[in-house]
Image: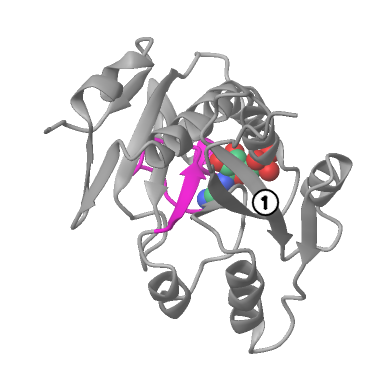
């Protein structure tokens, strides 16, 4: 029997609060043979999040951390640390992480947000975009810092706003891009093709362009 050793993959701990379609995109990517990262645990502040079921369905550790009590983030941090994450991915995690939590996992926490940041941070970004009358919106993957949706931008996808869009139709169009953008950002991080310097993210020149199809716009590149 040949004992072929698989190269080790980046361990992802995913924080979720609800539906979990972005988690599903990461689970699906992790199921691909050559994807350099894998979801090892899913942790939620919401006991009935369907995202937890998505993880359980494929045999991945799924835990609820009760958000009641002042020590919530301490308990959350312990659960996360116990899984030895290489990267923590917020995927529809609807709580603001405290600065001490962010400092504890400095440079290792990323988030996906349904707008082209820095426009429309916070809740209901798609509704804010519609109310502002923008013609283009999109989604952003960024490192988390102490602010609300303010951290260094890794990748963005631009998505058109149609004249007859409502919040639901725009959310749905953006979500389809989120499902492509999040695994791509994770892959670039796992392959060491992203460098965080202060509040800027730089991409390796070659990889920055290899997966782009006109919608995904990387930050300026040096290498
Ligand atoms: C996604 O659209 C995600 O970008 C957004 O919540 C949705 C979660 O959907 N996150 C935020 O607004 C964070 N500020 P999902 O649970 O199906 O992945």
Q: Mark 1: is the Cβ under 8 angstroms from ligand 1? A: no
Taking the view exactly as shown, the residue that stands out farthest to the top is: 213
**Quarter of image, res 68:** bottom right
Instruction: Check the image and tell me how it is coloured.
Output: one colour
- Determine whether 149 is above or below 97 in the image: above
Q: Is residue 98 rendered to the left or right of residue 152?
A: right
Residue occupying image coordinates x 88% and y 41%: 57
Give the camera-side residue of 108 and 8. 8
Q: Quadrant of the N terminus?
A: top right
Taking the view exactly as shown, the residue that stands out farthest to the bottom is: 70
Dominant secondary structure (helix, strand or loop) of the stretch shown in magenta: loop
Q: Residue beneath label 1, please?
A: 40
Residue occupying image coordinates x 79% and y 57%: 62
- The location of residue 24, given as percent across then percent down, is 70, 35
Query: Is 88 colored magenta in this rendering?
Result: no
Residue occupying image coordinates x 37% and y 68%: 146
- The location of residue 6, given as percent across then percent down, is 59, 36
Query: Is 116 colored magenta in this rendering?
Result: yes
The span shown in magenta is: 108-127
Give the camera-side residue of 11 and 146. 11
How many badges with numbers are in the image?
A: 1
Taking the view exactly as shown, the residue that stands out farthest to the front is: 1
Q: Quadrant of ligand 1?
A: top right
- The location of residue 136, given as percent across then percent down, is 38, 22
Q: Is residue 37 rendered to the left or right of residue 156?
A: right
Q: Is residue 59 rendered to the left or right of residue 207?
A: right
Q: Secondary structure under badge 1?
A: strand
- Determine whether 216 is above or below 23 in the image: above
- Taking the image as drawn, is residue 76 in sight? yes
Q: Quadrant of the C terminus?
A: top left
- Taking the image as drawn, is residue 123 in sight? no
Residue occupying image coordinates x 49% and y 55%: 86
């Amino acid at each position: 029997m040949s004992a072929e050793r698989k190269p080790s993959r980046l361990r992802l701990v995913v924080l979720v609060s609800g539906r979990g379609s972005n988690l599903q995109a990461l689970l699906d990517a992790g199921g691909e043979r050559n994807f350099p990262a894998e979801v090892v645990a899913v942790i939620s502040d919401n006991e009935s999040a369907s995202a937890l079921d998505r993880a359980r369905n494929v045999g991945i550790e799924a835990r609820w951390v009760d958000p009641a009590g002042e020590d919530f983030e301490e308990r959350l941090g312990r659960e996360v640390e116990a899984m030895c994450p290489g990267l923590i991915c917020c995927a529809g995690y609807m709580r603001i992480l405290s600065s001490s939590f962010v400092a504890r996992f400095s440079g290792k926490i990323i988030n996906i947000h349904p707008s082209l940041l820095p426009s429309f941070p916070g809740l209901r970004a798609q509704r804010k975009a519609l109310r502002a009358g923008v013609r283009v919106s999109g989604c952003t993957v960024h490192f988390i810092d102490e602010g609300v949706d303010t951290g260094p931008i890794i990748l963005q996808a631009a998505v058109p706003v149609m004249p007859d869009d409502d919040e639901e139709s725009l959310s749905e169009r953006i979500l389809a891009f989120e499902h492509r953008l999040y695994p791509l950002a994770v892959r670039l991080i796992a392959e060491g093709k992203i460098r965080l310097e202060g509040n800027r993210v730089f991409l390796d020149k070659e990889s920055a362009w290899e997966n782009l199809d006109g919608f995904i716009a990387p930050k300026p590149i040096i290498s």
